[in-house]
Amino acid sequence: MIAEGSALTLTAVPVALGAVLAARVRGPAVEPAFLDVRGLSVRRGPVPLRRITLRADAGECVAVFGAGSRTLLTALAGNVPARGRVRLGGADLAAVPAGRRMPLGLCHLAGPVPDTNTKTNTKTAADERTVAGRLAAHAHVLGHADPAASAGAVLEVFPALHRRGADPAGALGPAERELLGLAEALLTRPRLLLVDGVVAGPYGEAARTVLRRLAASGTAVVVTGRPVPAVLDLVSRAYVLDRGRVAAELVRPTPDQVLRLLPGNPDAGDAAP
């Protein structure tokens, strides 16, 4: 069971953007959509994206399914070169370097935490830290007054991670690494949360509870994964991609509606169609 009290306490803590955010991100004071994406294109990758348009209101959970969905989340996080307009709360998110978006509390990509360096196929320094140590380091980057205490509070929210707190992060299994990514997001409490996996995994119930708490605090949430009831019950709308384009926008979608629109394997978020 998830520790509801801890989740409520953590998600109620505001992120201190203040003058730093105002100095780095400028734009009109009011926008109809909290996240407003128009004409987003990514030329490289398994499935290039072509002029993607979507939105997510503050406090709303939306889903993206189909080939290229994982690339889309990565592009919104700023981790791959992309063209087009991405505005967050009326401000130009693309004007903020990817490495600054998470520390400023703007955007967080919660997905599988890699256990190796993909270039050298060796363990990274971060993976040699304990689970608790990795979370404390993340809290330190975010400016928490007591990073160790913040890490401990998050571990109370996720019993599966709490049991592994003294273990190396690199020793976690795939599902636990996804949960670790979400735990880091809970420390961040970003204005935009991008979630790859975990929602429908073995720790999905805990993940969905946390996502609902974050959405209730005003975070816009975009998730990808399999179009199963556990995911669709979380979201108010879904975008279905086909050949790198938005094929449909569905309100309160059902699994049958999504599956009819997916041309290939619904599990292959970035596989070629």
Image: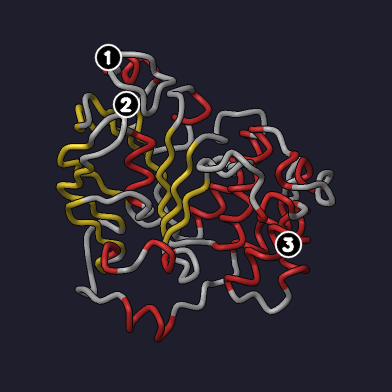
* Residue at screen point 50% across, 69% down: 103
Check residue 67 in the rendering and tell me which mark sits there, or answer none: 2
Characterize the local packing of mark 1: few (<14), some (14-19) or many (20 or more) Cα atoms within 10 angstroms.
few
Examine the image and state in which quarter residue 208 appears: top right
Q: Is residue 107 above or below residue 238?
A: below
The reply to whether discs 2 and 1 touch (Cβ–Cβ < 8 Å) is: yes
Q: Position of residue 3 (x, y in %)?
A: 75, 50
Three-letter amino acid code of the residue under disc 2: Ala
Query: Marks 2 and 1, how far apart in space?
Result: 9 Å
Q: Which residue is mark 1?
A: 263
Characterize the local packing of mark 3: few (<14), some (14-19) or many (20 or more) Cα atoms within 10 angstroms.
many
Which badge, 2 or 1, comes first in the chain's sequence?
Answer: 2
Residue furthest out toward the front: 120
Three-letter amino acid code of the residue under disc 3: Ala
Characterize the local packing of mark 2: few (<14), some (14-19) or many (20 or more) Cα atoms within 10 angstroms.
many
Q: Is residue 96 above or below residue 173?
A: below
Three-letter amino acid code of the residue under disc 1: Pro
The reply to whether discs 3 and 1 touch (Cβ–Cβ < 8 Å) is: no
Which badge, 3 or 1, comes first in the chain's sequence?
Answer: 3
Residue nearer the viewer, 204 or 82: 82
Examine the image and state in which quarter residue 114 appears: top right
Q: Which residue is mark 3?
A: 151
- Quarter containing the C terminus: top left
Residue nearer the viewer, 13 or 180: 180
* Residue at screen point 56% across, 29% down: 200
Query: Marks 3 and 1, how far apart in space?
Result: 42 Å
The reply to whether discs 2 and 3 touch (Cβ–Cβ < 8 Å) is: no
Query: Marks 2 and 3, how far apart in space?
Result: 35 Å
